[in-house]
Image: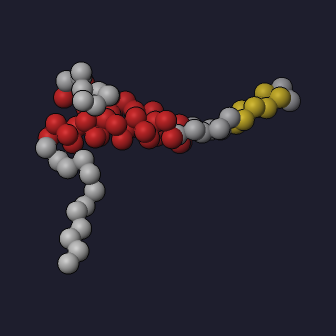
Amino acid sequence: MGTYSHLTDDELTALRAKLVASLTDRLTAPTAASSSGRSVQYQQRTQDLRDEIAAVNAEIDARSGHSAGGPIYLVG
């Protein structure tokens, strides 16, 4: 059971779209602002969003029957 196993397929797709839009916004938004001689900078921490997107994608893949693991190598 994944973190998002309680959501429907449509809710998962909508959540993934929302998370990707949030990631895109965070990556393209300005990281500094200044006014009246004061300025502020903030960091673009995207790892949490990327982890959530990966979890949603894993749940979607599990429901559609895709392999959750990597490739299987045969050594002989």
Asked whether residue 14 appears in the rendered view, the answer is: no
Q: Nearer the viewer, residue 75 or 25?
A: 75
In percent of the image, x 21 and y 42: which residue is there?
61
Question: At which x and y percent is residue 41?
Answer: 72, 35
- View extreme (top): residue: 6
- View extreme (left): residue: 65
**Figure quadrant of residue 3:** top left
Report the colour scheme. Answer: secondary structure
**Figure quadrant of residue 44:** top right
Question: At which x and y percent is residue 30?
Answer: 62, 38
Residue 73 lies, with reference to residue 54, above or below; the image says below
In percent of the image, x 20 and y 71: which residue is there?
74
- View extreme (right): residue: 37
In percent of the image, x 86 and y 30: which residue is there?
37
Q: Is residue 11 left or right of residue 24?
A: left
In percent of the image, x 20 and y 40: which residue is there?
62
Q: Is residue 23 left or right of residue 11?
A: right
Question: At which x and y percent is residue 69?
Answer: 26, 51
**Figure quadrant of residue 50:** top left
Question: At which x and y percent is residue 76?
Answer: 20, 78
Residue 31 lies, with reference to residue 8, above or below; the image says below
